[in-house]
């Protein structure tokens, strides 16, 4: 049973969001629960967790971004989707690694697309991999586990959630095999996974493992554009 939490202080939005999910995903094993406040969901989290969180950002007793931070403290891999009337918060979603950011006026179409992506993810955890090669060893690494990759002489080093992995391929070879929607060049010698970017500020990327990566002068605008496109499309 996959549980979905919808948090919005507007009753009509909560019910229409729930109805869209239940109507379009009858065969999926979803249990949808609605909450009108920040504190209602916080109370529920002390007992049971959810697979997907659909959050409004402006709540009467708190902020959806702060709520998402609380969720991230206890659930590293939960799917967080922001459903809001305001575009101004879009890039802030990177701080909590939001799966998607949906404007309410486009809700139904975008929500269905997003939930389909999540359904594929739930059933495809072993897909989307890179074959790392070193000294006669071949190891599969999930793309979602890769934080960033950097050049070391003629080789490349994969910095993953499990640690560093040396790869006997040049960074150029690696870049040619990775999905360009998800992996971008930060500067000469570094490729970053947008999934793990928390912040872009003053020419520096902050990754979710705490590492800082300088953005090359010619890559800043491209990365900002890719980050915006990533939030619009959703990936994970």
Image: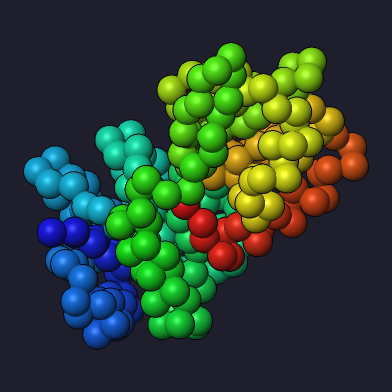
User: Relative to 68, is 181 on the left or the right?
Assistant: right
Q: Residue furthest front?
A: 136
Name the residue: 64% across, 46% down: 178
Q: Does residue 96 sit above or below 121 in this rendering?
A: above
Percent position (x, y) of residue 19?
Answer: 24, 83
Whole-percent x, y for residue 195 in the image: 54, 44
Residue displayed at 50% across by 81% down: 106
Residue at 56 percent across and 29 percent down: it is: 132
- Please indicate whether residue 174 sits to the left or right of residue 48 in the image: right
The furthest residue to the left: 47
> As drawn, is 172 to the left or to the right of 81?
right
- Quadrant of image for the N terminus: bottom left
Tell me if I can see residue 144 in this picture: yes
Q: Which color scheme did the rendering employ for the protein?
A: rainbow
Above or below: residue 83 compared with residue 185: below
Above or below, 135 against 82 in this view is above
Residue 22, given in percent of the width and then of the height, sits at 22, 79
């Amino acid at each position: 049973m996959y549980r979905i939490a919808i948090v919005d202080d507007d009753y009509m939005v909560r019910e229409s969001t729930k109805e869209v999910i239940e109507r379009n995903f009858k065969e999926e094993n979803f249990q949808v629960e609605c909450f009108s406040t920040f504190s209602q969901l916080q109370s529920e989290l002390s007992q049971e967790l959810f697979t997907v969180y659909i959050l409004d950002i402006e709540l009467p007793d708190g902020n959806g971004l702060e709520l998402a931070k609380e969720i991230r403290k206890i659930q590293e891999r939960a799917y967080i989707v922001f459903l809001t009337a305001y575009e101004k918060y879009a890039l802030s979603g990177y701080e909590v690694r939001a799966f998607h950011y949906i404007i309410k006026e486009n809700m139904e179409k975008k929500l269905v697309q997003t939930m389909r992506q999540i359904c594929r993810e739930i059933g495809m955890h072993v897909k989307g991999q890179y074959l790392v090669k070193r000294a006669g060893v071949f190891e599969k690494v999930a793309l979602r586990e890769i934080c960033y990759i950097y050049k070391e002489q003629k080789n490349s080093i994969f910095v993953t959630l499990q640690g560093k992995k040396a790869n006997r391929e040049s960074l150029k070879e690696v870049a040619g095999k990775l999905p360009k929607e998800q992996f971008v060049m930060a500067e000469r010698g570094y490729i970053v996974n947008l999934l793990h970017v928390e912040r872009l500020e003053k020419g520096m990327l902050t990754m979710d493992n705490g590492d800082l990566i300088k953005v090359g002068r010619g890559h800043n605008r491209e990365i900002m554009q890719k980050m915006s496109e990533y939030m619009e499309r959703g990936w994970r």
